[in-house]
Image: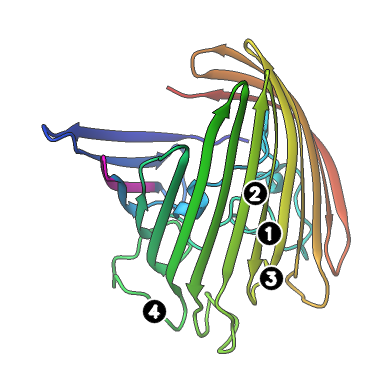
Amino acid sequence: YSDGEVHFKGSTTLDNGITFGVQIELEAFQSGDQIDENYAFVEGSFGRLVIGGENTAGYMMQYGAPNVGAPVNSGWITSFVPAPPDSTTGFRTPALSTYVDLANDDHALNYYSPRFSGFQVGASYVPAATVNGEGKNFPVYADKETENHDLFAVGANYVESFGEIDVAVAGGYRHATAAKSGPGGVGPSQDDPEQYSAGLNLAFAGFTVGGSWAMESSDRPTDGYGADLGVSYSTGPWSVGVTGFHSEVDGVNGGGEDELDSLQGAVSYAIGPGITGSISVLYAEWEPSTGEDADGFAGIFGMKIGF
């Protein structure tokens, strides 16, 4: 398994202190979404305004459980322990993660406030939530019959240190107007989808303990919740951790719930600046409301390089 991106970044700061910049992310492999996030930003004492293809503030400001090695609070689980055919999966949904969103790098207007006494808030508006990883240009407005639209999202977090204890808390909310029919909806009676999320991390003397939760209320198969819990310890270049994830969602067939339980333990070593190696052991169990259960183990050696 491999994943990689090349980021093109540029910025300039004017004499008045305001910074203008851009970021374009190119996938390092052939992909239908060849260009990932791509946006411009303006930043100053007033905060940060981001315009373009980027996730919403609710997603960007979330905290999850500490994780060492291969992540479990992520759709990556499906790459190592495949879900059975009747299981509900979906990136940015509580079926696989607490990092939820109703959009995926769609054209958005995002604003983040300055951080005051540890607090920061963010807000987002997405005209057309196509969830295909590409901004909509032709036409720029949503097809309300087939695309969720007028997505509003808010996020907030608090980061502060109290003596030797570091605290990070986050919360978020997203709401979109549902498509009437077609790929974005299930029929004229579809409810507007809503998502909620929260997360907490506490760090002390090399230990970090934390967890997070996310819930979706909708007519989609991903209606339900997901939660993670984990602990890690770091000393010098070494880190070790254990993280678990559990989710229960409506499922593709209705009439029951699809469940996922996963657990991962890992150790990592910082080889040098931007270079980290890790060894992980991952277990996942899928329990669809219909069809056969499935589970499996994976032993994973990983290398992360960034510069």
Between the C-alphas of marks 1 and 4, the distance is 25 Å
| In the rendered image, the vertical position of residue 180 relative to residue 244, given as above or below | below
| Amino acid type of the residue tagged 1 in the rendering | Thr
Compared with 195, 47 (above or below) is above
Tag 1 near tag 4, CB within 8 Å: no
From which residue to which does the magenta span run? 37-46
Q: Which residue is mark 3?
A: 221
* Amino acid type at mark 3: Pro
Asked if marks 1 and 2 touch (Cβ < 8 Å), the reply is yes
Please tell me the numbered disc located at residue 75.
2
Picture layout, residue 65 above or below residue 147: above
Q: CA distance from mark 1 to mark 2?
A: 8 Å
Which of the two residues, 204 or 255, is positioned nearer the viewer here?
204
Residue on which disc 4 sits: 143
Tell me which residue sits at (72%, 27%) in the image. 232
Q: Which of the marked residues, 3 or 4, is nearer the chain's N terminus?
A: 4
For the residues labelled 3 and 4, the Cα–Cα distance comes to 22 Å
